[in-house]
Image: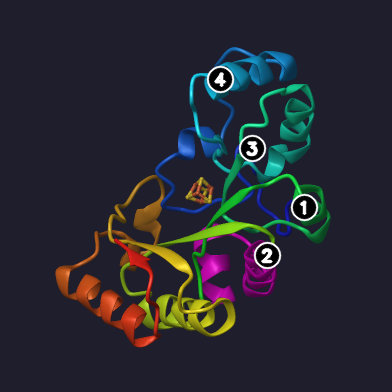
Amino acid sequence: MRESGRISLGCNFACIHCQNWEISQQFAEGSVCGEREIAALIDDAGRRGCRNQNWVGGDPIPHIPFWLRVLLWETEKTPVFFNTNGFYSTEASSLLRGVVDIYKIDFKYGSDICAEKISGVSGYWKVITRNLREARQRGELLIRVLVLPRHLECCLRPIVSFISEELGPETRVNLMDQYSPHWRAAELPELKRRLKPDEWEMALKIAYEAGLKNVIT
Ligand code: SF4
């Protein structure tokens, strides 16, 4: 699934500020759970009223074949919530067609340079925008945008413009102000600190100026 060079385990990205780096970037200790066992757990949760099964990570992208095999054992048809950074190949996208009910996609960067610098991936914009367009056509879509310090013009502005113009101003967007530095964030000066209040105000202004009408904060 990877479209760039860094090694990944629980995630196909290597964001230098990852708060879950212990599970996204290295092997963790734990017990192995088989496909049938997980399917039974999901079915049990579904029978008790659980509204969806949330495929998450790290990111579920490196594990799509596994999750598809789990689905084969399920009997309750609990809706699939695909919780992802959205950087997957056309082949992966084909596998997801007709399987995923709700796409929750993190739209991280408005610039390939920032994506390379922070997450270690190349060709970000082309891939994420293709997958967002497809997700929009296929099912429910929620886009999550974590505002990064000093990435308002290079990232946030093109992100919200794309969403409003290409996906529609009614698209549901969760704009988040809770960035905090983790893991190797100190390697980039602008990521050493949290968002300032005036940056957050500016972020909201940029989102509304782009015409977005369905912003959750
Ligand atoms: S996409 Fe998310 S889980 Fe993966 S490395 Fe980046 S912040 Fe961590």
Residue 155 locus on image (x, y percent): 45, 76
Q: CA distance from mark 2 to mark 1?
A: 11 Å
Residue drawn at 82 percent across, 54 percent down: 94
Residue 67 locus on image (x, y percent): 71, 33
For badge 3, the amino acid type reads Leu
Q: Which mark is residue 97?
A: 1
Relative to 122, is 49 on the left or the right?
Answer: left
Q: Nearer the viewer, mark 2 or mark 1?
A: 1
Q: CA distance from mark 3 to mark 2?
A: 22 Å
Work out whether 176 lies above or below 167: above
Q: Nearer the viewer, mark 3 or mark 2?
A: 2
Q: CA distance from mark 3 to mark 1?
A: 24 Å
Q: Which mark is residue 47?
A: 4
For badge 4, the amino acid type reads Arg
Q: Is residue 84 magenta?
A: no
For badge 1, the amino acid type reads Arg
Q: Earlier in the sequence, mark 3 or mark 4?
A: 3
Residue drawn at 50 percent across, 70 percent down: 109
Residue drawn at 66 percent across, 25 percent down: 76
Q: Which mark is residue 9?
A: 3
Q: Is mark 2 within 8 Å of ligand 1?
A: no
